Image (tube, rainbow, N blue to C red):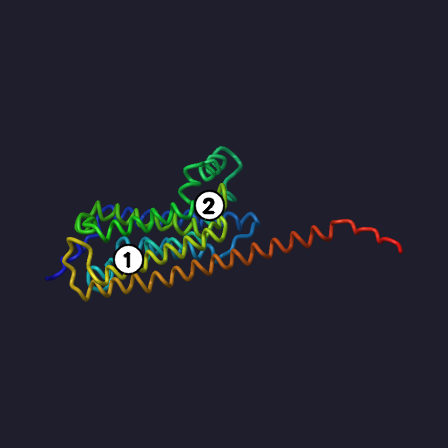
Amino acid sequence: MHAHPVPADPGLFAYGLALAGLSAATAYGWAAARLLRRGDVWSRWRTISFLAGSAGVAWIAVSPLPGEPFTAHMMEHLVLGMAAPLLLVLARPFTLALRVLPPDTARRRLLALAHSRPAAWAVFPPVAALLDLGGLWLLYRTELFAAVQHRPLRHAVMHGHVLAAGLLFTFSVCQLDPVRRRSGLPLRGATLLAAGAAHAVLAKTLYAAPPPGTAFTAGDVRTGAQIMYYGGDVVEAALAVVLAASWFQAAGRARHRRSRTNLLQPASPETGP
């Protein structure tokens, strides 16, 4: 059986996603430049990270990828759902927005949204992992993938969900920007391990059997599953490095606070014989 060809025209909604990525990159670059012009410090590596993530989103949205259909799709999944979200989250866009906005209604509303109860639940690591990995299992282990494969609007919605869910999960694990209630490192680490295991098992099931209702060749499905498996490992290892760096910084701040406390405490009087 032969796989159905993927349409060459990405469609209006895909162009919209590409435009959104480029617009976000432009806004971020403008905000970072504004901070630097007024003498504030903002790492150029954060700007480079955001620009790279936005460019990845725009490229995936409109550019045909090499390989057979399912292999190309898995490359899309890896960039949209894992690599681009990591690059975008590392850039700390919410922190940049808070620093560049004047202390008026817009900034207060942004803070209120970030500290709201729904936002807190959305970035709670187990919830974000369920939205991300649960959506992938539903997509690939039911006939949902076959239903959206050749329909541009549904395909664009799928891309949007993969990107949004990937951003939520990555943000919930890293938690580099201000949040209402920061989850502990043990919970975030355990969530990352569980999500990585679920992602790997899903890739193995795809290696054994294609998504229901599709007609991809066996070689195409296996290559795509390998990209999902090994590419996912690389991004998850990068997330683990971010978590380790967060733990190291938190431990350093705790040692610094203890040292300052000890220095500020008055020395106890020596007791005589």
Between 45 and 120, the one nearer to me in the picture: 120
Residue 175: x percent and y percent? Answer: 47, 49
Between 20 and 68, the one nearer to me in the picture: 68
Between 17 and 194, the one nearer to me in the picture: 194
Residue 244: x percent and y percent? Answer: 50, 59
Residue 94: mark in rendering: 2
Which residue sits at x=52%, y=53%? Answer: 42
Residue sitting at the far top: 105
Q: Quadrant of the C terminus?
A: bottom right
Task: Say whether residue 29 is left or right of residue 201.
Answer: right
Q: Which residue is mark 1?
A: 202
Using a 10 Å C-alpha cutoff, classify the residue at mark 2 as few (fewer than 14 neighbours), some (14 to 19) or many (20 or more): some
Residue 217: x percent and y percent? Answer: 15, 63
Q: Tell me the kind of residue under disc 1.
A: Leu
Q: Tell me the kind of residue under disc 2.
A: Phe
Secondary structure beneath dot 1 equals helix
Q: CA distance from mark 1 to mark 2?
A: 32 Å
